[in-house]
Amino acid sequence: MTGVGYTVPVVAAVIAVLAMEFGLLHTGLFRRPAYWVSMLIILGFQVLVDGWLTKLSAPIVIYSSTATSGWRFPFDIPVEDFGFGWAMVTAVLLLWERQRRHGRGKDAP
Amino acid sequence: MNMDRWQYLIVLAACLAITAPLEGFGDGVYRQPQRTATAVLPVAAVFVLWDVTAIAAHVWTYNSRYLTGTRLPGALPIEELLFFVVIPLCGLLTYGAVDALLEKVRS
């Protein structure tokens, strides 16, 4: 069945990361403008790096045609990769934010 | 000389090189090794498991032409393990720099 191998786990990973923040950590990461600005920048670079890794003319990573939805955009990037990347980077940022020291001297108003 | 097999490694090295100057903004990432390891390693462990499972289930494979050839248990290319450290480092460096710059603008 198309998509079971990659599409379904990606959706599960995105849900798991959202549950991590809203059910467990409550870091407030998603309320920080720095997060959204960073994700835009990271998305731009993901297109370049992932585009290189997945280009069909000379791929470094080769996906089973039955494991993905088959949607590739932009370039030849399987759209699932954007969920994969978002989940990975956001999970790391959540664990990073959880360790934020409050009341740092130089951050005090 | 055939450079193809270094390609994935070179991509990762380029990511580290491009983001390295961001360390200079804010409190840094490399200067907080404990905090960085606590954020990166648990997520890397989960994604390595996912990767090894996907390799075993033939969800994706790697083009050996562009790999050094060093494989870890589970047929995980060494480059792929590094990916789960390098890309999060780049993400943290980006976030740290953006956060520091926005703080500066506001204050």
Image: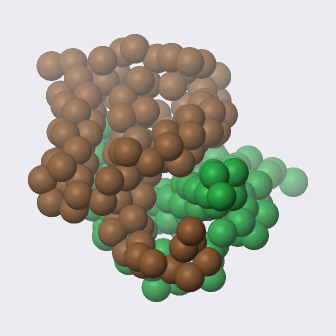
Chain colours: A brown, B green
Q: Quadrant of residue A53?
A: top right
* A13 over B106 or under it: above or below: above
A56 or A13, which lies in front? A13
Instruction: Tell me residue A86's x, y (percent).
Output: 40, 41
Q: Nearer the viewer, residue A101 or A49?
A: A101
Residue at 35% from the left image edge and 59% from the top image edge: A94
Q: Is residue A70 rendered to the left or right of residue A36?
A: left
Q: Residue drawn 50% across and 59% down?
A: B88
Q: Going by the image, does A74 lie left or right of A82?
A: right
Q: Is residue B2 left or right of residue B97?
A: right
Name the residue: 41% across, 67% down: A96
Q: Residue furthest right?
A: B1
Pick the front one: B17 or A36: A36
Residue B51 vertical position relative to residue B20 in the rendered view, above or below: above
- In the rendered image, which quarter contains the C terminus of chain B? bottom right
Tell me: residue A78, above or below residue B104: above
Q: Residue at x 56, y 82 (%)?
A: A105
Write down the quadrant of residue B46 in the picture: bottom left
Residue B1 is situated, as x and y percent measured from the top left of the image, at 87, 54
Q: Is residue A71 visible?
A: yes
Image position, residue A16 (x, y; %): 18, 47
Q: Position of residue A76 (x, y in %)?
A: 54, 20
Q: Quadrant of residue B86?
A: bottom right
Residue sitting nearer the eye, A61 or A44:
A44
